[in-house]
Image (cartoon, coloured by chain):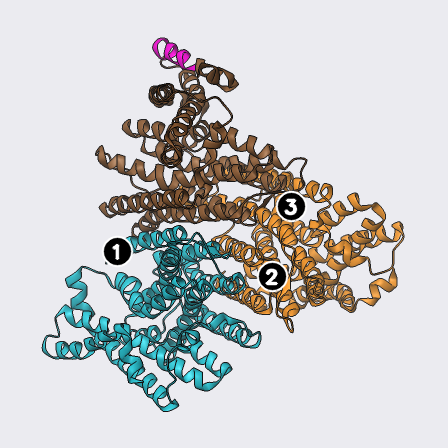
Chain colours: A orange, B brown, C cyan
Amino acid sequence: MFRAIVSSPINVLLLAAPISWILAATAPESSWVFVSAAASLIPLAGLIGLGTEQLARRAGPALGGFLNATFGNAAELIIAVVALRNGHIELVKASITGSIIGNLLLVLGLSFFAGGLGRRTQKFHRTSATNTSAMLFLGVVALVMPAVFDLSIYGNLKAHPPALDRLSFWSALILIGAYGGSLVYAFTAHHDLFRPSQNAAHDGPAFSTGAAVAVLATGTLLTTVQAEILVRAMAPALARFGFTELFVGVIVIALIGNAAEHYSAVTAAMRDDMTLAVEIAVGSSAQIALFVAPALVLYSFAIGRPMSLLFNAFEIVAIALSVISTTHVIADGESNWVEGLQLLSIYLILALAFYFVPA
Amino acid sequence: MFRAIVSSPINVLLLAAPISWILAATAPESSWVFVSAAASLIPLAGLIGLGTEQLARRAGPALGGFLNATFGNAAELIIAVVALRNGHIELVKASITGSIIGNLLLVLGLSFFAGGLGRRTQKFHRTSATNTSAMLFLGVVALVMPAVFDLSIYGNLKAHPPALDRLSFWSALILIGAYGGSLVYAFTAHHDLFRPSQNAAHDGPAFSTGAAVAVLATGTLLTTVQAEILVRAMAPALARFGFTELFVGVIVIALIGNAAEHYSAVTAAMRDDMTLAVEIAVGSSAQIALFVAPALVLYSFAIGRPMSLLFNAFEIVAIALSVISTTHVIADGESNWVEGLQLLSIYLILALAFYFVPA
Amino acid sequence: MFRAIVSSPINVLLLAAPISWILAATAPESSWVFVSAAASLIPLAGLIGLGTEQLARRAGPALGGFLNATFGNAAELIIAVVALRNGHIELVKASITGSIIGNLLLVLGLSFFAGGLGRRTQKFHRTSATNTSAMLFLGVVALVMPAVFDLSIYGNLKAHPPALDRLSFWSALILIGAYGGSLVYAFTAHHDLFRPSQNAAHDGPAFSTGAAVAVLATGTLLTTVQAEILVRAMAPALARFGFTELFVGVIVIALIGNAAEHYSAVTAAMRDDMTLAVEIAVGSSAQIALFVAPALVLYSFAIGRPMSLLFNAFEIVAIALSVISTTHVIADGESNWVEGLQLLSIYLILALAFYFVPA
C-alpha cells in the first residue's frame, strides 16, 4: 500500500498539506495558505480514487462499479460541501460549471491532442459516448430552466422566488433518478459506461480490505480538512492574484478536482485507448451534472441553506456550448489532434471570458 | 366498421362526450365539463385517424399518403382553430409547443423506454430520422427569430410591431413550402417518411369509401363540438386545479392531441419496430412545426385575428433544447431504455418549469 | 491566360468596373454606382481565385495548399478591410455573419438541392466534415462570448467596456492559432480539408508564374478599388432600395463575396462530387470564422480603430442556429434535395428577419 502511494510522483504534493497547516497557523493572511492547500488537494483526489478502486476490487463487479461511480468525483463533492457549509454558494456553482466544461473541453481536448500526435486518427466506441450525451443534455436542461424562469418572468437573474427553489429541488430528484437508472443500465447490460477507474487500478498490487478502507478514510478526512483551509484562505488569495470567486471556482477548483481525470484520460489516450479516455472525460461530466450537482442541492436543503440550480449567464452558455460542441465532436467515434486543439481553444476562450468578468 | 370502433378499448371514452353535453347544460360552471370534454377528445383523435387511414387505403398510395400526412394531426389542428376563434392565442401557441416537445420527449422517451426494457439496444433507420431533423431545425429557426426580433430591438417579448406579423406570415409560407417539398420527396423517392398510420391500419378490415368518409366526417364534427366545449369550460377548470392557460396548453391539450401517437409509437417500439416508432414521434413533431403551426398562422390572418410566431421564452427554450437533444440522441440509429429515461426526465423537468410559471 | 479569363461567362461582369468608374465620376449620388461596383466584384473574386490556384500549382502541394487556404476568402477580406478603414464596423461584422451563414445555408443548400434533383441520395466523406464542425463550434464560442459578457454584466449589447476589446483581441489570437493548427493537420495528414479550389483548377491550362502573379496582383488591386467605390456609394443605395447597412452586409456583400464558392460548390454537387461541395461550403465558413474574422480584429487594433467580436443578437442567433443545423445535417454523410430545400428555407427566414430589422 505504502509503495503504491510513494510510486506516484504526484503524491509528493501531499507534503503541501503540512505546509498549509504551518502557514495557516503562522501567517493566516498569506495567499500561500490557499496555494499550498490547493496543491495538497491534487494528490488527495487521487488517494480517494485509489482507496475506492481497491475497495471496489474486493467488493465484486456490481457493488464495485457502484462504488467507483459514486466516489468518482468524491473530491469535488467534498470541496463543494465544505464551501456550501461556509456559505460560498457562488463558488460551489462555479466549481460545478468548471468541472463540467473542464472535463468536456480540457480533459477531452488534451486527450485528443496528446493521443492524436503522431497518429492520423484514433477511433473509439460510439454507443457509450452517445448514451452519455443524452445524460449531458438532460443536465443542460435542468441547469438552464431556472435561469429561463428568472429571465422570462423577472427580466433578470437576480430574482429568487420560492418557485425557483422548488423547481431546483424537484429537478435534483429527477436528475438523481435518471443517474440511478443509468447505473442500473450500465451494470445489467454489462455496458462499460462506468468502468474507467476500475480498469486503471488492475495494474497495481491489491490492498487488503482494511488497507483500502484506511486509504479511503484518510483521503476523505484529509480532503475535508484541506478543503476547509482552502475555502477560509480564499479571501486573501483572491485579493493577491486579482481573481474573482467565479474564476477560482470555474478554473482553479475545477482543475484541482479534475487532476486525476486528466492524468487517467491523457495516459489512456496516449496508449491509444481512446474509448477509455472519452468515457472518463464525458462520464465524469455527466456524473457532475446528474449526481454531484443535484446531491449538493439536496444537501443544501437538508442543512437549511438552499442552493438553487440557478446559474449565471456565463455558466449556462459555457455549459450549453461545451455540451453541444463536444457531443457533436464525439458523435462520429473518431478523433485527431486538431479536434483536440479546437476543444482546447474553446476552453481557453471560455476561461478568458470568465477571467474578464468583474467581481 | 362498427366492430373496428368497438374493438378498441380506448373508445369507451367516447361516452364522455354525451356526459360533457349533459354537464355543460346542467352545471356549466363545474370543472367536470372540461374533464369530460378532454376525455372525449382522446378517442375522437383516434377516430379521425381511423377514417383517414381507411380513406387512404381506397385512394391509392400517392393521394393516400397525402391524406395521412395532412390529417395526421387533425385533432390538434381542430382544437387550435376553435381556441383561435375564441381568442385564446396563448393557448394555441402553448399547445403547439406542447405537441412538439411532447412528441420528441414523451412519445419518443416512452417508446425508447418501453421498447428497450428487456433488450440491450434497438436499432432504427437513420436516414429518415436525419431528414426529419433538418425539418425540425427549420421549425426552430422560424419559431425563434420573432422572439430574437422582439428581444434585440425592444428588449422584451411584449412588443408587437407590424414587422413581427409580416415576418410570421412569410415564415409560415416558407415553412409550408418546405413541408410540401418534404411530402413530394417522401412520395417520389418512395421514402417512408409518412408511412406510420397507414401501416397500422393494414391489420384491420377495410371500410367502404362511404363508411370511411362517414367516420372521418363524424370524427371531425364531434372533435369540433368537443373542442368548443373544452375551450369554453376552461376558466372554471383552471381555477379549480390551479393550472395556468400555459400549462394546460403545453401539457394537457398536447397530451390529449398526441394520445394516438403515444399508442401507435409505444406499441411499435414494443414489437421492436423502432423505425416506425421514431417516424411517428419525430415526424409528428415536424408536421406540427412545419404544417400545423404555419397553417394556424395563415388561418389567423384569414379571420382577421393575426397570431404571430412569437413564442414566450419558456416555449422557445423548451422547443430548442428538445430538438437539439432528440436529434442528437437519434443520430446514431440506436436506442435503449436508459436513453428513453433521459428523454422522459427532460420532459418532466420542462413540465415542472411550465407548472411553476405564474399566471 | 487571356483565354482562361474570357472563357468564363461570368467575367463579362468585369465590364461593370469601368462603368462604375464613369458613374462615380459623373453621377456620384446615383445608386447605380453601388450596383455596378457590386457587380464587378463578383468576377474579381473569381479572378483572385484563379491567380491563387495557378500560383499554387507552381508552388508545390504544401505551399500551394497554404496559398489556396489563405487566399480562399481574399475578396471578402479586402472588402472588409476597406469598409473597416472607412469606419463601417457594423457592415464588416454583418458581412462576416453573412459569409458564415451564406456558406452554410445558401451554398450548401443550393448544392444539396441542385445535386440531389434526380438522385435519391448523395454521399460524402464524413470525417473532414466533422473536423470542420469542431472549427465552426469554436468560432461560435468566440463570437458568442463577448455578447454574453455584455448581456450578463450590463443587461444590453450597447456597453463597450475595455475588457470586451481585450477578450476579442485574445480570442482572435486563439482562433488564428487554432486555424493554423488545422492547416498543419491538413497538410501533414494529407487530409483534403483545403483542397477545393486547387482541384477545380486542374482542368484548365497552366499559367506561367509571372502570369499567375500578374492575375493575382491585378485581381487584388481591382478588388480594392471596387470595394472602395462600393463602400463610398453605399449611402445613396441604402436610401434608394430601403436597405439597412445590416441587411446589405449580411445578404448583399456576402452574396458577392461568396459567388465563387456558389459556382464551384454547385457544379461539384451536380457532377455528384458532394465531398468537394461540402468542403467548399463548410470549409469556407470555418475560414471566415477562424481566419478572416480574427484577422480583421487584429487589423482593426493595428490601425487604432478596434473592432471587437461583439455581434448583435440577430447575428449571434443566426450564426449559432446555422452551425448547429448544418453540422447536424452533414453528420450522417448523406444528402438529398429536400435537405437542401430545408437549408435554403432556413436561409430565407433568416434573410427575412434581417430585412425587417429597422435601421
SS assignment at label 1: helix
Q: Which mark is residue A291?
A: 3
Q: Position of residue A299 (x, y in %)?
A: 65, 42
Q: How far separated are the C-alphas under marks 1 and 3? A: 46 Å
Q: Which mark is residue C355?
A: 1
- Main secondary structure type of the part rendered in magenta: helix
Tell me if C207 is positioned left or right of B43 in this view.
left
- Image disc number at residue A334: 2
Q: Are marks 1 and 2 in contact (CB under 8 Å)?
A: no
Q: Quadrant of residue B188?
A: top left
Q: Quadrant of the N terminus of chain C?
A: bottom left
Quadrant in which residue A108 is drawn:
bottom right
Left or right position of C250 against C146 = left
Dot 2: chain letter:
A
Magenta stretch: includes residue B79: no
C315 shown above or below B262: below
Quarter of the figure with the C terminus of chain C = bottom left
Asked if badge 2 and badge 3 are on a common chain, one would say: yes
Q: Nearer the viewer, residue B81 or B198?
A: B198
The amino acid at mark 3 is Phe
Q: How many marks?
A: 3
Magenta region: B16-26
Cα distance in 3D space between marks 1 and 2: 41 Å
Amino acid type, callout 1: Tyr
Instruction: Indicate whether residue B25 is drawn in magenta.
Output: yes
What chain letter is assigned to the residue under label 3? Answer: A
Please report the residue visible at 57 percent of the width from the left and 51 percent of the height from the top: A93
Q: Residue B185's mark?
A: none
Classify B86 as above or below C124.
Answer: above
- Mark 2 secondary-structure assignment: strand
Q: Nearer the viewer, mark 2 or mark 3?
A: 2
Check disc 2 and give the amino acid type: Glu
